[in-house]
Image (cartoon, rainbow, N blue to C red):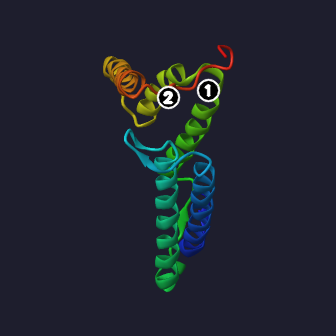
Amino acid sequence: MIYMNNMAVCNYIVGVLGAVIGGLIMQAAVAFPLEFTENGPGPGFWPFTLGAVLGAVSVLLLLYTFVNKADLHGVKVQLSSTGNKRVYLMMGFVVLFCALISILGFYPAAAIMIPAVMRLMDYRNYKVIGLTTVLCLLFIYLVFGILLHTQMPQSVFME
């Protein structure tokens, strides 16, 4: 088993990384309009908000760790536990999903991602996995494609 000797150190690392990533998301989001119009918020509003929330939660984690560092100092973190391995796999799935969106387009990438995540979570009923995938893609298409007229990312081969 791989351990990190100190929960406080682990929390500081996660807090700093979360704050940096949140700041980068906010920085990228300001390239798009943030203001509200008669059609709702601009395309940068929700990414900016999510980046701000990630940054705020990261700062809260850092503050919590600073206040409780004596209690957290002796707690060991098992980095190679089964639960953590699933988290690492999920992080890999997210990176793969982002790459697949560019290569295949949004809908095929989501059609791969949804069942993969369900299997990662130990769901084994393949009929339900298939039905969930179809219903999720249909919902996304109806809401974003039809109602909101949002163009989803296309495959690099179709541009």
Q: Secondary structure at mark 2?
A: helix
| Snapshot quadrant of residue 122 | top left
Residue extending farthest top: 158
Residue at left offset 57%, top offset 32%: 97
Residue where numbered disc 1 is placed = 100
* CB contact under 8 Å: marks 1 and 2: yes
Q: Quadrant of the N terminus?
A: bottom right
Q: Point out the tag, 1 or 2, that comes first from the N-terminus.
A: 1
Report the front residue among 31 and 6. 31
In the image, what residue type sits under mark 1? Leu
Does residue 10 appear anywhere in the picture? Answer: yes
In the image, what residue type sits under mark 2? Met
Report the front residue among 102 and 150. 150
Distance from Cα at disc 1 to Cα at disc 2: 9 Å
Residue at left offset 47%, top offset 53%: 50
The percent position of residue 45, horizontal first and vertical second, equals: 48, 49
Residue where numbered disc 2 is placed = 113
The percent position of residue 5, horizontal first and vertical second, equals: 60, 71
The percent position of residue 86, horizontal first and vertical second, equals: 50, 44
Residue at left offset 46%, top offset 77%: 64
Above-or-below relation of 10 to 158: below
